[in-house]
Amino acid sequence: MNGEHAALLAQLRQAARPTFLERHTTDSYGGSGHLFYNVSVPDRRAIARRWLAANRTMTPAAFLAVVESLFEGESHEEKTLAAILLGCHPTGRRDALPDDVDRWLGCLNGWAEIDSLCQNVFSAQEMLADWPEWRRLLEQLSRDANINKRRAALVLLNGPVHYTDEARFRDLALEFIGRLKGERDILITKAVSWLLRSMITRHREAVEACLAEHGSSLPAIAVRETRTKLATGTKSGRVRGGAL
């Protein structure tokens, strides 16, 4: 275990709260099955901020060594803390390769851990800077036997299709939705819904066309939530102050 990892783990254990009885000592809610200290997300973020402030002069290589060690840790909190650190450290993140991301995903299980690394950690600009390799990774993930990696292929595109007009992200998102639309595990059906809804901001016509052409074969929850957002601007149809 990396020495800085050990120090961070000590802080996580200190911040641990009594676990809910139904969770026992594993992260059953997030689906990971990993050791669970029940450290709140705000506490994890605070630990990350303090550590980053104290290690401003750390080289990117040394930073990524800590991240690597955390991803290989036993607990849900160690793994998600690694993702939080990556999200807060653009210099270190620039040295992370798509193959590193693939390896880290192999340490993660369940929606909470996968999403911690894949949702808004790597920006569209960072992916485009090394697009051939990122595209290769995304294609590989979308066909992986591991359902967690197939979910990752969808979630990694959420930010890029929401924040940019870049057609390469839009087209890849539609390709993956078509490839995975027949799966009925919630890890995939909810990710398909999320990706379609993320596309509405910049690619509304493409989403409408996708629903018109593939609505009967898409997961029912994805069709329902996407149509509701198209009509109301929210997934549930509710806005502050009451229902639409």
Image: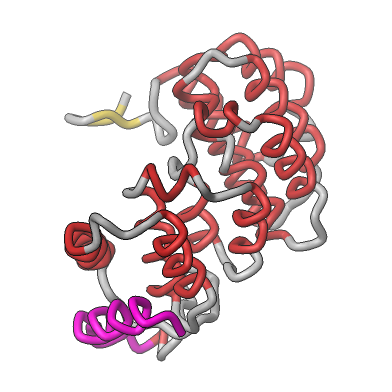
Q: Say which of 171 and 123 sits in front.
A: 123
Range of residues picked out in magenta: 1-21
Q: Say which of 142 and 189 sits in front.
A: 142
Q: Horizontal placement of 10 versus 96: left or right?
A: left
Q: Say which of 75 and 11 sits in front.
A: 11
Q: Residue 98: percent from the left, percent from the top?
A: 64, 47
From this viewpoint, is residue 36 visible? Answer: yes
Q: Say which of 121 and 115 sits in front.
A: 121
- Residue at horizontal 54 percent and vertical 25 percent from the top: 161
- Residue at horizontal 18 percent and vertical 63 percent from the top: 54
Of helix, strand and loop, which mostly describes the magenta segment? helix
- Residue at horizontal 62 percent and vertical 56 percent from the top: 100
Q: Residue 115: percent from the left, percent from the top?
A: 50, 53
Vertical side of 211 occupied by 122: above or below: below
Vertical side of 207 occupied by 19: above or below: below
Is the C terminus in the top left, top right, bottom left or bottom right quadrant?
A: top left
Q: Horizontal placement of 180 versus 95: left or right?
A: right
Q: Residue 49: percent from the left, percent from the top?
A: 21, 58
Q: Residue 182: percent from the left, percent from the top?
A: 81, 44
The quarter of the picture where residue 218 lies is: top right
User: Coloured how?
Assistant: secondary structure
The quarter of the picture where residue 220 lies is: top right
- Residue at horizontal 67 percent and vertical 38 percent from the top: 134
Vertical side of 189 occupied by 108: above or below: below
Q: Is residue 6 magenta?
A: yes
